Image: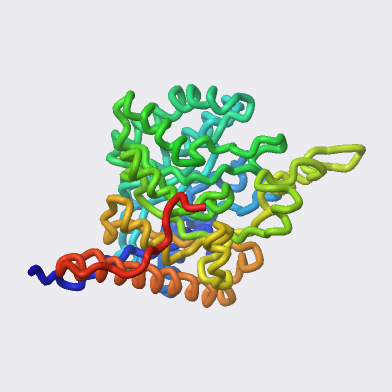
Amino acid sequence: MTVAPFAPQLMKVGVLTAALQELTPRDVRDADPDRAIEDWLAFARDLGADQIQLSAALHPSEADVPPEALLDPVANTLDLRQPFTKARANRVSTAIASTGVTLSDLGYFDNLLHADPAVRRKKHAFLLRVFDAAALLGANAVCGFVGRNQERTLDQNLGEFETCVIPLLREARARGLVYRVEQCPMPGWSTGDDFHNNIAYTPAAWIELHRICERHGVGDQFRIHYDPSHAILMGQDTRSIFQYLKDADYGFLIAGFHVKGQVIDARGVSAWGYGGQTMGRGDVSRDGVPAVPAAAWKKQTVLCEHELPGTAKHDPLAYLQNRSVDWLDHQLAARELLPLDAATTPLIVEHEYPKARIQDRARLLPILQGSIAFVRHIDAAAASMYALQHDVLKAQGIPTQGVGREPFRA
């Protein structure tokens, strides 16, 4: 009989720096761009985080999307108006060493398939600057979206992906990077009725896109940064998604996690269904009434609200109905169904709970501390259960008890 040691493998818990956009006052950071990164590393240390996901975005003076059209405003913690040089990288590396907080990856969340060629070129050029910064900082990945050309069908966008994104993935390969795609469908990106404005929105689509990447020799550059809030938005559950990927031999696609939840409003679903509000949104000018661009997000916000992990009530029925994220099962399923190295897998808290998106350091500090602590404890519980059941008991031939949550069960 073999006696296996109890050795749970914990994931690294981090935070996306868009959680507090103006941690460093704008007048200070515009004059000294890397001060924002230094301040965020120190803040993350105070939060109890292991890592930060460094948010990059076009500077507000250069962005093509006005802030009032954004559901969750982006943050240019990494300011790339000027080239990110080796000297700048050394300064950031010094701050990393002094705080003990590392980089999980860099994040730039934008539409790489924008219909306007000039806007698209601008976004692609910025992504290349993010790639350069990631390479100088020693990061191995950049996280973002694929996007969609909203003037074309989803099938036609596969061709757009092949034409426009494959060259970017070649650039990532040249720098030793992986591009990890978050699967948010981004319904509010369009004032039309399109719901899926990021074509990498679901597992079957990930597989289709990866096959295109493989044909061009960049399959290793395309991975998924899984966010369970978007699965809930589309009526899916984490365990079934992971089982589907495992059954299709594509479990390797998931290489990182955003821990952000979604709480479904049953009344909103009764009113509009999972397609969200389809008419009368107010996102298009009508009868002399000016448009409200952010109202395009009613395709999402009428039926759900983002959850900062730990802020939603414990609700076993909601877990079973896929109306909220069962965080413990999420972390268990990742270990049971995906070929992960848990110790090197980033678990990044993304703060988009509207009522708690406080842009005040003193008030936000204990909120994020609590959420990060919750995520860490949940992951430790899942790691302990997995190690006990799959290592210790299994080695001694002792069966686990009960049935557990089953994939695809209705």
Q: Which corner quadrant of the image does residue 394 belong to?
A: bottom left
Given residues 227 and 204, the one toward you in this image is: 204
Task: Locate the N terminus and report the quarter of the image it occupies.
Answer: bottom left
Given residues 52 and 403, the one toward you in this image is: 403
- Asked whether residue 36 is in view, the answer is no
Residue in the image at 59% along x and 76% along y: 363
In the picture provided, is 237 more to the left or to the right than 101?
right
Given residues 187 and 36, the one toward you in this image is: 187
Instruction: Work out whether 193 lies above or below 54.
Output: above
Given residues 364 and 267, the one toward you in this image is: 267
Residue in the image at 41% along x and 50% along y: 106
Residue 80 placement (x, y as % from top left) = 47, 45
Residue in the image at 44% along x and 43% along y: 181
Residue in the image at 28% along x and 68% along y: 400
Instruction: Work out whether 253 lies above or below 354.
Output: above
In the picture provided, is 234 more to the left or to the right than 224?
right
Residue 42 placement (x, y as % from top left) = 42, 69
